[in-house]
């Protein structure tokens, strides 16, 4: 006995036509070689940009004058966010050069570009070699890095002198 609420669906006679329609409407593969290539390129670019941001945030504060490369970067590339132009206050990051003369508490340092920098030392100045040293350990011809404040006349008041 059939209720009035029961629906009867007529049987489909042509199964071949239904299969063709289902095949045509089936989802296609969403990826191909181009999609994979773009995905790899996006991942590489994201990794590179992430590395640049990480170096900006947590990179070593390496002085440009002691890295051996213009701009202070690794392998000759400038650090992200810096320029390769000479810094206006070299002693703030370190002044590297060859000692021309030690006269009392003053060191005369010739930088790589030939400029002679006057370095004043005092009781607070630390002098380092492979071990802690003193001013008398610094000789003319030594290569040193000086940390300290630069005055308007270019004279550096040293807080530390490191002999290489």
Image (cartoon, rainbow, N blue to C red):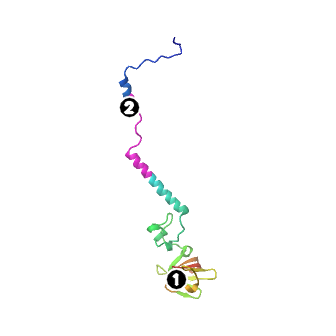
Tell me residue 145's x, y (percent). 53, 78
- The part of the chain drawn in magenta is 21-42
Residue 30 is a magenta residue = yes
Residue 90 placement, left or right of 17: right
What residue is pinned by disc 1? 109
Label 1: state its secondary structure: strand
Mark positioned earlier in the residue sequence (1 or 2):
2
The residue indicated by pointer 2 is: 24
Residue most extreme to the bottom: 103
> Judging from the image, what secondary structure is the residue with disc 2 in?
helix
Q: Judge depth for marks 1 and 2 and give the one in front.
A: 2
Cα gap from disc 1 to disc 2, whole angstroms? 82 Å
> Nearest the camera: 12 or 64?
12
Q: Is residue 150 above or below residue 32?
A: below
Q: What residue sits 52% from the left and 82% below the top?
A: 109
Q: Could you tell me residue 129's position as x and y percent?
A: 54, 80
């Amino acid at each position: 006995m059939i209720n009035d609420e029961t629906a009867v669906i007529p049987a489909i006679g042509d199964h071949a036509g239904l299969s063709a329609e289902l095949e045509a409407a089936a989802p296609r593969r969403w990826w191909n070689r181009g999609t994979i290539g773009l995905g790899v390129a996006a991942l590489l670019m994201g990794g590179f940009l992430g590395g640049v941001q990480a170096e900006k945030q947590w990179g070593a504060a390496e002085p440009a004058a002691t890295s051996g490369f213009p701009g202070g970067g690794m392998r000759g590339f400038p650090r992200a966010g810096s320029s390769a132009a000479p810094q206006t206050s070299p002693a703030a990051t370190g002044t590297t050069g060859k000692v021309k003369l030690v006269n009392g508490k003053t060191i005369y340092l010739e930088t790589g570009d030939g400029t002679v920098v006057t370095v004043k030392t005092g009781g607070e100045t630390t002098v380092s070699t492979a071990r802690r040293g003193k001013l008398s350990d610094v000789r003319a011809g030594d290569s040193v890095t000086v940390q300290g404040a630069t005055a308007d006349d270019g004279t550096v008041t040293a807080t530390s002198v490191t002999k290489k």
